[in-house]
Image (cartoon, coloured by chain):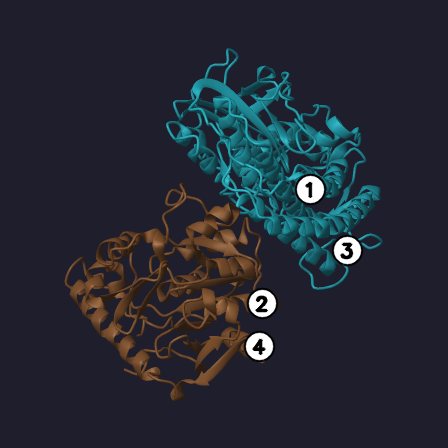
């Protein structure tokens, strides 16, 4: 007889989400639903009628973790719609900005997953906030990497959280020779730290992988070797930056994408029949509570070729670098492997940047209403923005955010794991839930359907 | 009043020991030489100063181009610029007697210019803005800690560019391009031409051209700067210097030790602190009247007196 258990809210990630799990007698998940319960912001609706300059700035405010990816994808979607090519140096600045964001986001993710992992050779879980070594120096290194990422971001983009320098048609201004040198020095420093940090994290993750059981709130939970495995396939548009419909051979195809309603995807109304007060923090939801993921979930389910796919660091590594490790640990290892790569690429971009070069296109068209899209590889996956601009006004805007792609994929990956480890699987996706919450839903005929949940 | 000169650790009359620099400078070359010294010593790695059209033309990457100066501007319109070398500093030296929005560059200095230690020159109101930005860094993330040296200049009031245009071209009957130097001193507004002509206008004439916003300011000697300076109180070619903060004190001590300035005790020079005090009180009294006047209109939102 399967039972239903709910972990709500899930912790140590951005946003507000929950896990509704149908488990068997042994506590193994038979069907898992991971759903966002962050309220809808309506950025897409806000965007309509605004100028293309405003929309990426608004879109970036959807979240503070990867605002740079939203800003860049938004700006480039506008450029794709109005068909505006930007100068090379503006591109370089955007690349640097995006990689800086990736570097400091991975560092943040490390802090969030470390409490799940063990110090190798001990039975002690890592507390990243302890003043004791060896964790203290790791925490300091993480802070320094974040500082480096943010400083480089604010030189290249004006601001490290919501970059102010991006413009439709290029960038507001180029940086000075001195600033270029500063970015270079910081990236070099970051590279050394990233190597150390990745090595540490991979060692800790491998140690976790070798264990037979783990402790969750005093419960001894067996650790399956296939934790987080799924067969959903991967989607990545570039090893580092992204793609857009302006390119000759774009690496994403809008015609292969479709979005369905959570109503058609998630489980219906159920009653909680398993409660575990020991589960950190504060136990799971009380027995007898009614849950209804269909109605509570606030995300659409995007599909590529008719299936949910995984996006993120592993998808990028699988697509572009022949990485082949499955499961949650593989995903986290892939993320750590991107660490150094992002600094190497950043250094190459800084080398290629000409500080006296032009960063604004000579002519920025007003737009003729054609559809344009741009994909940006955010730290946690492919962020696609779709826009239609006519006479310098946005007519249509849609955001397809990394974690939206991952919601359904992660739900599939939960199957076969002990329910106590569902959060560990979920954290492997480095979820950023708040920006994933959108309800632009298309039916089979690609028509916008009534938005049940908002009404 | 007793508070009109603000808090200071030291007050002297000083001038730069660099003769070449004195040729470019307004009075004692304090600001230019102090910033040059700070740049050399690594106390700052760049400074925000008021530069000219010529400078902007030669160094378009060192200014911020916006709607106000997109087409290269008129002569004597100050343009905030970020300088990182002594040569640039010299090219930008001298007082321009109209509004230069230097504080607008302060964030950009730490962003696309990549400065870690910023020096800034400004009028008393600009010093207030800088300090306020440090206290409440809204929209100025990481900027406050990067401000390494703030040099204030004495200011009675300022002129919009159109006013200077009117004063020079109409009252002084001189083309803007042919002006070599402008100066306020001895109760007169002086305009020196490149061909050697000198025109003096009584200050009375200039009053109606002042920026009305200046008439609520109660700070004459840049009370919130690290070091403030101006010609008033010292003989010709010298400047009065107030060293105010710990930072100011250490920079000034190093500059003196390096022989950057020759100084005289302020008590020994004419007209001395007496004149500075008199003018400061004049400004405060005059502007307090404006403040009182403003209390009577609006909805009870009279400006706060910064001294209480």
| Secondary element at tag 4 | helix
Q: Residues within 10 Å of mark 1 (few under 14, many from 20)?
A: few
Residue lying farthest to the left in this orientation: B296
> Front-most of A178 and A199?
A178
Q: Quadrant of residue B232?
A: bottom left
Residue B205's disc is none
Name the residue tied to disc 1. A351
Comparing B82 with A28, the one in front is B82
Q: Earlier in the sequence, mark 1 or mark 3?
A: 3
Q: Position of residue A436 (x, y in %)?
A: 54, 33
Q: In this rendering, do the residues under marks 4 and 2 share a single chain?
A: yes
Q: Is residue A340 left or right of residue A373?
A: right
Question: Residue B124 at what x, y percent from top left?
Answer: 36, 67
Instruction: State the CA–CA distance, disc 2 to disc 1.
Output: 28 Å
User: Disc 1 sits on a residue from what chain?
Assistant: A
Residue at image coords 72%, 52%: A189
Query: Where is residue A396 shown, x and y percent of the image?
Result: 44, 23
The residue that label 3 is drawn on is A124
Report the residue marked by disc 2. Answer: B43
Work out how far the residue at label 4 is from the one at label 1, CA to CA, in angstroms: 38 Å
Instruction: Specify whether disc 1 shares its chain with disc 3.
Output: yes
In the rendered image, the vertical position of residue A194 relative to residue B142, given as above or below: above
């Amino acid at each position: 007889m399967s039972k239903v258990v709910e972990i709500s809210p899930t912790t140590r990630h951005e946003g507000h989400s929950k896990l509704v799990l149908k488990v068997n007698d042994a506590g193994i998940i038979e069907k898992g639903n991971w759903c966002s319960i962050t309220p809808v912001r309506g950025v897409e609706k806000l965007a309509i009628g605004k100028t293309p300059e405003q929309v990426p700035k608004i879109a970036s405010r959807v979240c503070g973790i990867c605002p740079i990816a939203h800003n860049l994808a938004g700006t480039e979607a506008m450029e794709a719609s109005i068909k505006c090519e930007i100068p090379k140096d503006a591109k370089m600045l955007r690349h640097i900005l995006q990689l800086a964001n990736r570097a400091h986001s991975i560092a943040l993710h490390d802090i969030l997953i470390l409490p799940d992992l063990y110090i190798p050779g001990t039975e002690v879980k890592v507390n990243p906030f302890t003043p004791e070594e060896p964790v203290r120096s790791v925490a300091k290194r993480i802070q320094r990497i974040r500082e480096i990422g943010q400083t480089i971001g604010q030189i290249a983009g004006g601001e490290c959280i919501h970059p102010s320098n991006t413009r439709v048609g290029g960038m507001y201004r180029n940086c000075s020779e001195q600033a270029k040198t500063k970015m270079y020095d910081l990236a070099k420093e970051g590279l050394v730290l990233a190597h150390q940090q990745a090595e540490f994290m991979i060692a800790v993750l491998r140690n976790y992988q070798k264990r037979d059981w783990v402790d969750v709130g005093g419960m001894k939970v067996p650790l399956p070797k296939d934790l987080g495995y799924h067969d959903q396939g991967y989607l990545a548009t570039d090893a580092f930056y992204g793609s857009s419909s302006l390119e000759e051979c774009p690496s994403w195809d809008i015609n292969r994408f479709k979005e369905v309603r959570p109503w058609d995807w998630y489980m219906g109304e159920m009653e909680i029949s398993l409660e575990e007060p020991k589960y950190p923090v504060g136990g799971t939801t009380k027995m007898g509570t009614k849950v209804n993921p269909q109605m509570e979930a606030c995300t659409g389910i995007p599909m590529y070729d008719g299936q949910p796919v995984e996006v993120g660091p592993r998808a990028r590594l699988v697509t572009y670098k022949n990485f082949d490790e499955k499961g949650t640990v593989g995903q986290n290892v892939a993320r750590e492997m991107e660490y150094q790569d992002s600094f190497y690429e950043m250094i190459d971009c800084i080398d290629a940047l000409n500080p006296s070069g032009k960063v604004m296109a000579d002519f920025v068209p007003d737009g003729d209403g054609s559809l344009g899209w741009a994909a940006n590889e955010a730290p946690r996956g492919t962020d696609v923005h779709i826009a239609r601009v006519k006479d310098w006004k946005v007519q249509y805007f849609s955001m397809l955010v990394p974690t939206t792609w991952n919601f359904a994929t992660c739900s599939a990956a939960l199957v076969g794991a002990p329910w106590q480890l569902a959060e560990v699987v979920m954290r492997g996706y480095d979820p950023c839930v708040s920006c994933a919450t959108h309800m632009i839903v298309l039916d089979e005929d690609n028509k916008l359907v009534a938005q049940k949940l908002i009404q | 009043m007793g508070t009109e000169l603000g808090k200071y650790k030291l007050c002297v009359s000083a001038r730069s020991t660099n003769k070449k620099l004195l040729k470019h400078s307004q009075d004692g070359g304090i600001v230019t030489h102090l910033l040059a010294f700070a740049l050399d010593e690594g106390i700052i790695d760049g400074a925000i100063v008021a530069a000219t059209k010529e400078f902007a033309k030669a160094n378009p990457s060192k200014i911020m181009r916006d709607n106000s100066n997109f087409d290269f501007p008129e002569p004597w319109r100050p343009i905030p610029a970020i300088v990182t070398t002594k040569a640039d500093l010299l090219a930008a030296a001298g007082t321009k007697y109209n509004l230069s929005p230097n504080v607008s560059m302060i964030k950009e200095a730490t962003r696309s210019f990549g400065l870690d230690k910023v020096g800034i020159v400004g009028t008393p109101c600009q010093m207030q803005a800088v300090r306020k930005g440090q206290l409440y860094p809204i929209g100025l993330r990481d900027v406050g800690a990067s401000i390494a040296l703030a040099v204030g200049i004495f200011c009675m009031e300022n002129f919009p560019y159109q006013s200077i245009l009117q004063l020079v071209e109409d009252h002084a009957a001189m083309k803007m391009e042919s002006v070599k130097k402008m100066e306020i001193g001895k109760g007169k507004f002086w305009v020196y031409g490149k061909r050697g002509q000198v025109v003096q206008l009584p200050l009375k004439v200039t009053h109606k051209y002042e920026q009305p916003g200046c008439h609520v300011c109660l700070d004459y000697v840049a009370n919130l700067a690290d070091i403030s300076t101006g010609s008033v109180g010292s003989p010709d070619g010298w400047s009065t210097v107030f060293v105010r903060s710990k930072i100011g004190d250490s920079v000034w001590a190093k500059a003196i030790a390096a022989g950057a300035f020759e100084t005289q005790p302020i008590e020994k020079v004419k007209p001395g602190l007496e004149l500075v005090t008199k003018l400061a009180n004049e400004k405060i009294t005059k502007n307090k009247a404006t403040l009182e006047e403003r209390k009577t209109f609006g909805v009870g939102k009279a400006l706060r007196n910064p001294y209480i």
